[in-house]
Image (spheres, helix red, strand yellow):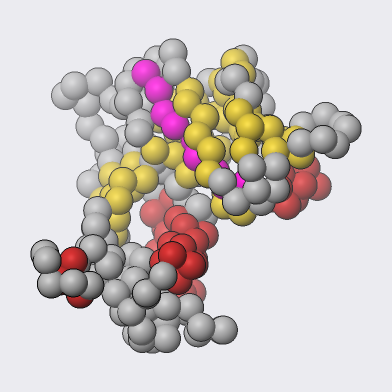
Amino acid sequence: RSLSCRRRPRRGATASAPLASIAAVDDLLAGGEVLSRPTDQGVTVRAIAARPLTASVEWGTAPGAYTRTSASVHAAAGDPFDIVLTGLAADSDYVYRLRVAPDGEPGAPQSGAEHTFHTQRRPGSAFTFVVQADPHLDENSNPDVYVQALTNALADRPDFLVDLGDTAMTDRCVISGPDSCSRERATGYEQVASRNALMRSYFARVAHSLPLFLVLGNHEGEAGWLENGSA
């Protein structure tokens, strides 16, 4: 289900922060970095706090060389937070890393893994994007195959990722114990949130470096007639 239009040679791999530091950041996050709203001058980094924290982003144009730092943001436990990077150059490679510190605890912020992105290319330039649809994660899905498909997409270094929907599947999938899709329709916030958190955990494997665009599918629970017949 992954399609891509071929383009330039792949960008080189970048260095990573020390593993112990990355683990410390992961312990503070309920959801890892996901890029969104890419333009020729900026991009948004979104994550979810596992406990109260303060976060910022460092970025630059060369691996390990961070020349700019965002303003800090505060997030309560369970809350998503956005950090907007601005003043970027068009059609350029960037590296970035998240810096996170738990509120009320001493010590320097922890650094996350280094990730990459490319700002919007100039008009007329070639670019690559990946399209996926219907990940489902139901009884007809193989999570290992899906992970491999995402890994293949990331390895191709596209500019962004588009998901065409039937992703959360909340009109026919709820999480029940070890069953990720018990073939029921979600009837409350917690059921909807848990399925979206499950899918987000897969997107976070690649969307730290591939800005993500989501499209609602027909199984996303947006069908009003299932509730009161008014739609």
- Quadrant of residue 87 in the image? top left
Q: Is residue 41 left or right of residue 64?
A: left
Residue at image position (13%, 72%) is 229
- Depth order, front residue of 52/116: 52
Magenta stretch encompasses residue 172: no
- Quadrant of residue 73 in the image? top right
User: Residue 178 at what x, y percent from top left?
Assistant: 56, 84
Stretch in magenta: 41-49
Q: Is residue 194 above or below residue 209?
A: below
Does residue 193 appear in this view?
yes
The outermost residue toward the right is: 106
Instruction: Give the quarter of the figure containing the C terminus.
Output: bottom left
Q: Is residue 67 left or right of residue 119?
A: right
Q: Is residue 69 above or below residue 135?
A: above
Magenta stretch encompasses residue 46: yes
User: Residue 141 at what x, y percent from top left?
Assistant: 38, 80
Residue at image position (50%, 34%) is 82
User: Residue 32 at what x, y percent from top left?
Assistant: 57, 49
- Depth order, front residue of 73/14: 73
Q: Could you tell me what secondary structure mostly forms the magenta stretch?
A: strand
User: Residue 102 at what x, y percent from top left?
Assistant: 76, 39
